[in-house]
Amino acid sequence: MHRAARRKVPFPVIALVGYTNAGKSTLFNKLTGAEVLAKDMLFATLDPTMRAVRLPTGKEVILSDTVGFISDLPTQLVAAFRATLEEVLEADLIVHVRDIAHPETEEQARNVRDILADLGVTSDAQVMELWNKADLLPDNQRTALFDRACRQEGVFLGSAITGEGLETFFSEITRQLDDTRHQEDLQLKFSEGRKRAWLYQQSIVLDERETETGYWLVVNWTDRQKQEFRSLD
Ligand SMILES: Nc1nc2c(ncn2[C@@H]2O[C@H](COP(=O)(O)OP(=O)(O)OP(=O)(O)O)[C@@H](O)[C@H]2O)c(=O)[nH]1
Ligand SMILES: [Mg+2]
C-alpha cells in the first residue's frame, strides 16, 4: 500500500542516509520546516519521515529521513532495518550526509557505504555526499576540505545549521534529477496502448518497431519517468 501510493507520486524521492548524528534530521527539518506542501497530507499519515518539500531551486521532491547507521551493526539489525531502508533502494537519489568535523569521519563513511552495499544499493545508484557541519571546522581545514570537495564529483561542503554551501548543493541535486536520462529497450503488447501513449506524451520515444505481439520501443528517460511508467496499469 505504502509503496503503491508512493509510486504514483510525480516527483523524485531523495533519501538522506548517514552515520548517526551526522545531521540528517537537521537538514530534513530545515527544508520541511519552511514550507509544508499540500501534497504532504498524503504522506503524513503514512510515514512521518517522508515529506514533500520544495527545494530552494523550486524543485519539488519527496525527502526521506532515515535512521542513522552505527558501526558494527549486527546482521539481525540490518535485517530489521531493511523495511525502513527500502526507501533508500527506491530513491532516485541518495544523499549521504557526513559529519565532516568528526575525527572518525572517514571510518563512519566507510561504514555507511558498507551498509548501503549490504542493503543492495548498487554502484550505479546516484549517491551524493554532503560534508556537513562545515561551520565547526577551523578556517584552514575548511578551506582544504572545500577544495577537496570541489575536485570530487557529487561532493559538497556545507552546514545544515548555518545554511552555508547548501545553495550549490541543492542546485546540483536539481540538475541531476532533471538531467539524468538513460536509454532503454521496451516491449509492449498491443493491449498496452495506454502505456505507449504515455511514452509519446512524454516525448521520450527514440525508436519504435511493430513486432508480432506488440511494439518494441527505445526510450530515453529519467528514473522518475521510469517509475511513473511502471505505476501505470
Ligand atoms: N554545528 C553543527 N551542528 C549540526 C549541524 N547539523 C546537525 N548538527 C547537530 O548535530 C546533532 C545531530 O543532528 P541530527 O540532525 O539529529 O543528526 P541525524 O543524522 O539525524 O542523527 P540520527 O537520527 O541519530 O541518525 C544535533 O545536535 C544537531 O544540532 C551542522 O551543520 N553544524
Ligand atoms: Mg535523525
Image (cartoon, rainbow, N blue to C red):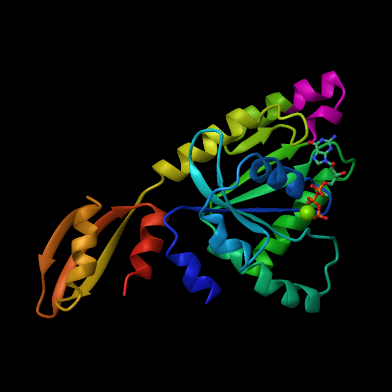
Foreground pick, 46 / 213: 46
Residue at position x 70%, y 40% from top?
30
Q: Quadrant of residue 146?
A: top right
Quarter of the image containing the C terminus? bottom left
Q: Residue furthest right?
A: 103
Residue at position x 75%, y 28% from top?
145
Q: Quadrant of residue 162?
A: top right
Foreground pick, 199 / 146: 199
Residue at position x 23%, y 72% from top?
187
| 177 with respect to 202 (left or right) | right
* 78 to 30, vertically: above or below: below
Count of numbered labels shown in the rendering: 0
| 165 with respect to 13 (left or right) | right
- Is residue 122 visible in the rendered image? The answer is no
User: What is the x, y in percent for residue 39?
Assistant: 51, 55
- From the image, give the main secondary structure of the stretch colored magenta: helix
User: What is the x, y in percent for residue 212?
Assistant: 9, 79
| 67 with respect to 149 (left or right) | right
Q: Quadrant of ligand 2?
A: bottom right
Foreground pick, 180 / 231: 231
User: What is the x, y in percent for residue 156?
Assistant: 65, 34
Q: Quick check: is 201 in the magenta stretch?
A: no
Residue at position x 68%, y 61% from top?
48
Q: Which residues are magenta?
A: 133-145
| 210 with respect to 163 (left or right) | left
* 6 to 123, vertically: above or below: below
User: What is the x, y in percent for residue 144?
Assistant: 76, 23
- Is residue 196 visible in the rendered image? The answer is yes
* 132 to 151, vertically: above or below: below
